[in-house]
Image: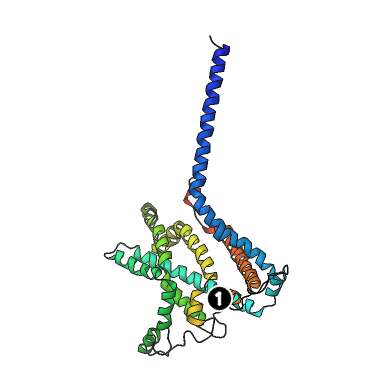
Amino acid sequence: MRGSPITSATATGVGIHRRSRWSTQRWRDTRDGYLFIMPWLLGYLLWTAGPMLASVGMSLTAWKILDTPRFVGLANFAALLHDPLIGTALYNSAFYVAIGVPTHLGIALLIALLVNLRLRGVAFYRTLYFLPSLIPLVANSLLWVTILNTDYGLANVLLTLLHLPAVNWLHDPRIAKDSLILMSWWGIGGQMVILLAGLRSIPDHLYDAAQIDGADWWARFRQVTLPMLSPSIFFNLVIALIGAFQVFTQAYIMTSGGPENATLFYVYYLYNVAFQSFDIGYASAMAWLLFVIVLVLTLLQLRGSRIWVFYEAELKR
């Protein structure tokens, strides 16, 4: 009978049973999900989040590695303001970022445009340009020490053949940073591949429409290629800036921070403080200063990207 107590009770029981089954299944899915991510989560807590939190505590102590840590509050951060080498290291890193990142991106974009041409054998050149980025940075540094050697290096041999004076690449404080930036151009392969992928994703009909409207190659590049490629450029810019502030291996192997502290980059100085002077507290404070600098610059880039980065999804809204 419609609306009878028996029917209502039956429907209520079925509803409770279904909710119970759904709750059980949801709990099992949640449990399984956490079990699957547990290895990564434990690794993150042990090797990333844990050390970061520990470094906060160490930055508030005076701790030579063989001594007992002593709490000093913000004294390490105050000492950063009076350390002359901090200014030198920050300047060297800022110079490397300001010159190295734009030139690196510009050359990577130029090569990506070239290997995007529909020519015979272009796959070979794509591979050729990408291969150097696969070589470990230590091996690259050792190779370039030889190339830039003042007496017998390939760079000076080529200059001699062109009747130009030899250059003291790694031992002249005026050009030592420029020499390391020159070396960094060798590893444009990763950025080139990302930019090439962005170029390949640009629809051909946009170029056809621009050409019908009478746009020349430069106008098509400015009005079609660059806007459509801006997300790839922005991604490479953020990653390159973060990486450039952390340059270390080249200075460690090729110049040892010299000559005259010309290549004393910030992370290399941090390494010297932590593992040569064994001043762990001060080194931790230096690390957090670098973290803040990179974080602020990254946030500024993200904020500024709203002006020049084009996202196709926004166009579809």
Which kind of residue does numbered mark 1 sit on?
A: Tyr
158 above or below 138? below
Q: Position of residue 89 (x, y in %)?
A: 59, 77
At 54% from the left and 29% from the top, the residue drawn is: 20
66 above or below 171? above
Using the image as rendered, state which of residue 77 and residue 300 is in the foreground.
77
Crowd band around label 1 with a 10 angstrom C-alpha radius: few (<14), some (14–19), many (20+): many
User: Taking 255 as reference, is 52 left or right?
Assistant: right
Residue 4, quarter of picture: top right
Q: Can residue 317 be seen by looking at this rendering? A: no
Check the image and tell me how it is coloured: rainbow
Q: Position of residue 311 (x, y in %)?
A: 49, 52
55 above or below 158? above
Secondary structure at numbered mark 1: helix
User: Taking 312 as reference, is 161 left or right?
Assistant: left
Residue that extends furthest to the top in the rendered view of this protein = 1
Q: Can residue 2 be seen by looking at this rendering? A: yes
Using the image as rendered, state which of residue 130 and residue 136 is in the foreground.
136
At 42% from the left and 79% from the top, the residue drawn is: 142
Q: Position of residue 259 (x, y in %)?
A: 54, 85
Q: Position of residue 63 (x, y in %)?
A: 67, 72
The residue under label 1 is 268
At 70% from the left and 74% from the top, the residue drawn is: 79
Residue 167, quarter of picture: bottom left
